[in-house]
Image (spheres, grey):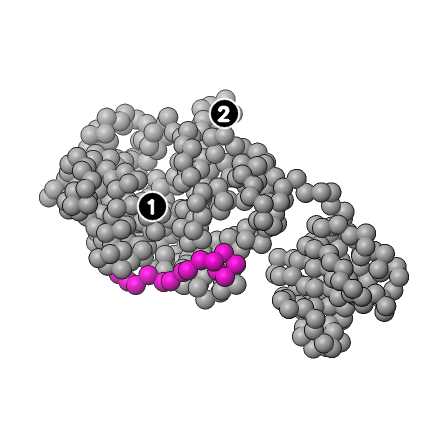
Amino acid sequence: MKRTHEIAEIPEEPGANVRIAGFVENIKEVGRLLFVWVRDRTGTAQLTLKKTEADEELLKVVRSLNTHDVVSVVGVVPDRREAKVGMELVPKEIEVLSRAERLPIDVTGIAATQLDTRLDWRAIDLRNPKNLAVFRIQNTLIKGMTEWLDSHGFMQVFTPCIIGAPSESGAEMFEIDYFGKKAYLRQDPQLHRQLLMVAGFDRIYEIGPSWRAEPSHTPRHLCEHRGCAVELSYISDELDVMRVEEQLFVAGLKRVVEERNREIEILGIELEEPNLPIPELRFPEIYEILSSMGKEVKFGEDVDREGERLLSQYVLEKYNSEAFFINRFPFAVKPFYVMRVDDDPIWARSVDLIYRGLELSSGGQREHRYEKIMEQVRLKGMNPETVKWFTEFFRYGAPPHGGFNIGIERLTMAVVGASNIREVVPFPRAPERYMP
């Protein structure tokens, strides 16, 4: 191996011998001293050489280094530390593993570079420690959520990414050739998760990709995105689903607060666990709230981006919460599979989670009664044959169930305060971008 320790693992006791590896971040010569800073994913180490004591061949190697050369270093922890920040080693051997040409973009953040240019050179752009901090936080969010799900009896599953019929709107799907037949990349694993409820799996979750062929150029949309999708059976109503979702959401945030202090500091963000239960706003009262804030929304219509922002402001002022649920959307704006309120069927048991002004998820209670499902298929003007592969199974019994899908990129974006969702995807896919 080209290293025995990551930089954060370097022992503090003087005289310890270690071998580290990473990118050369900077080189500086001050009087009788030469300094080289080497960075790996865990931090930065300062190499300190006294020119009067160091081997001539070693000095020659150091003076030949360029920033972002990849090196392996054998060194000793000094008796007296010169480094003001990070770990320090007195190098005994430096092996150049790879030479770096002059970088095409600035990765220090000192010089502003347009996002499109940064994405063109994404593998280089990701060397910025702030980018690594974003993805460490994303990883910890997922870990916190999956551990909560595992500990509460949910089983991880994998549903198809290739489907034979549109689940919502064919105009928004990527069509593919499947052995001479027309197929699609899925919009959402929603319907197959429901079929697993019909199968009696009761509590499941899935982390995986979905695709939408929408020509959306907003800073909140992607053509390929990932979600933490959850489905559970034997619920009383959508409130049971909300209680699960809020606990899962808080479990992810809590893990970040507990484990990612360094990354939070690097990004300069503030993060707190929301208090439970998370506040809930419902239609049609939402129309009255927005009207009182100067925004008129026609009865029976959905809330737009500005409406979500105003409702976020309202909840923050009234409940001191950055998160809230929107419940009981108009059925007219929701898909056929959601459950309507039986005694007031203009409204659906459909729930969105909003956090820091951004919609993170859609979910709620699904319709499990075959006759009702077919009635709603007709109400939506759909051809029953196109969804028969899904609806037919409900003829044979299905437990009351519901679920949600939290967008991983949306959640990360809200947590780290990114202005564009492409910042929180290693290699984003958008209408104008499918490389690198």
Q: Is residue 258 left or right of residue 93?
A: left
Q: Is residue 390 visible?
A: yes
Q: Which residue is mark 2?
A: 177
Q: Residue furthest top?
A: 180
- Image position, residue 167 (x, y; %): 35, 33
Q: Compare marks 2 and 1 and give the one earlier in the sequence.
A: 2
Q: Residue furthest left?
A: 343
In the image, is residue 315 part of the stretch drawn in magenta? no
Q: Which residue is mark 1?
A: 359
Q: Is residue 421 left or right of residue 396?
A: right
In the image, is residue 278 part of the stretch drawn in magenta? yes
- Image position, residue 134 (x, y; %): 51, 53
User: Few, some or many C-alpha atoms within 10 Å of disc 1 (few <14, some 14-19, many ≥20)?
Assistant: many
User: Few, some or many C-alpha atoms within 10 Å of disc 2 (few <14, some 14-19, many ≥20)?
Assistant: few
**SS at mark 1?**
strand
Residue at 83%, 65% in the rendered image = 51
Amino acid on which disc 2 is placed: Asp
Image quadrant holding the N terminus, namely bottom right
| Along the line of sight, the residue nearer the viewer: 118 or 406 | 118
Quadrant in which residue 187 is drawn:
top left
- Image position, residue 155 (x, y; %): 41, 55
Label pair 2/1, CB-CB below 8 angstroms: no
Marks 2 and 1: which is nearer the front? 1
Q: Is residue 3 visible?
A: no
Whether residue 79 is situated above or below residue 398 in the rendered picture: below
What number is the disc on residue 144? none
Quadrant in which residue 124 is drawn:
top right
| Along the line of sight, the residue nearer the viewer: 249 or 397 | 249
| Along the line of sight, the residue nearer the viewer: 201 or 356 | 356
Tell me which segment is drawn in magenta.
264-279
Amino acid on which disc 1 is placed: Glu
